[in-house]
Amino acid sequence: MKLNGFNLGELAHNLPDTRIRLRFSRLDKAIGFSHADQLRELRRRAAASGLPCCGKNIPKMSFSPALSEGCLSSCEFADLYLYDFVTAEEAAEKIHLFDDDKYVLMSSKRIPVFFPAVEAAANAVRYRIEAENEFSKARLAEFLAASSWIYERVKASGKMQRFDIRSIYIGSEMSADSKTLILTLAFSQGANIRPESAVLSIFGQDMSIKLIERIDLLWKDSKGELNAF
């Protein structure tokens, strides 16, 4: 049936009734994926799941901020908009069927349809960084004592990017053997520093990083406290 030239069936299938927030781990086989690669893969799983996805040909979804190539993650989010009611458990059952050595579904929950997207609401990001050699406590103390700590890089376009790492540093924890660092940095909607660049700037270019994993995306509440999504 059509009304004023619009197909009512198609229109109804583009009006979300349910929004499911899916949280994935990004594993070794996806470590080289670009952001576009990741979006295509997660959309493919949604489209093949049989869930009542909004969108005529491409499932309507929103995602977490782009993750640097070369990083693992345990907090890749994909919000899936559905035109019919579906429980979080039903969605998880269908998406779990596609778990592989690239992505594994960690959790599924219903959220309000008109809730802010993770990408728009994230205020900070937390990484786990493992190194072959030790992170220097003396270098960290020097960094913490500084009022600013400037990192500069020239992009392929020739444009200069400049970050004051000290101003975006929120906190860190170091393992007993000083070979694992949990680093929390402020996140903005504009340009952001890559975690390996921050680490090498703070601890020196001789650091041999063997693993970087994004472990949390965080949002700031009205009291200024950070909370994990």
Image (cartoon, helix red, strand yellow):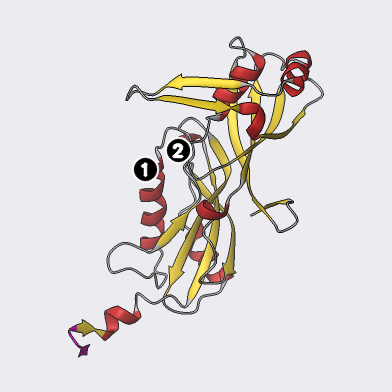
Identify the residue at the far front of this view.
147
Mark closest to the chain's N terminus, 2 or 1: 2
Q: Quadrant of residue 32?
A: top left
Q: Which residue is mark 2?
A: 30
What residue do we see at 34% from left, 21% from top? 158
What's the residue type where badge 1 is placed? Asp
The majority secondary structure of the magenta stretch comes to loop
What's the residue type where badge 2 is placed? Ala
Residue 24 relative to residue 183: left or right: left
What segment carries the magenta color?
1-5
Q: Secondary structure at mark 1?
A: helix
What residue do we see at 78% from left, 26% from top? 175
Tell me: residue 86, above or below residue 182. below
Q: Position of residue 144 (x, y in %)?
A: 75, 23
Name the quarter where the C terminus is drawn: bottom right
**Magenta includes 179?**
no
Residue 93 relative to residue 223: left or right: left
Q: Which residue is mark 1?
A: 37
Tell me: residue 195, above or below residue 153. below
Does residue 178 appear anywhere in the picture?
no
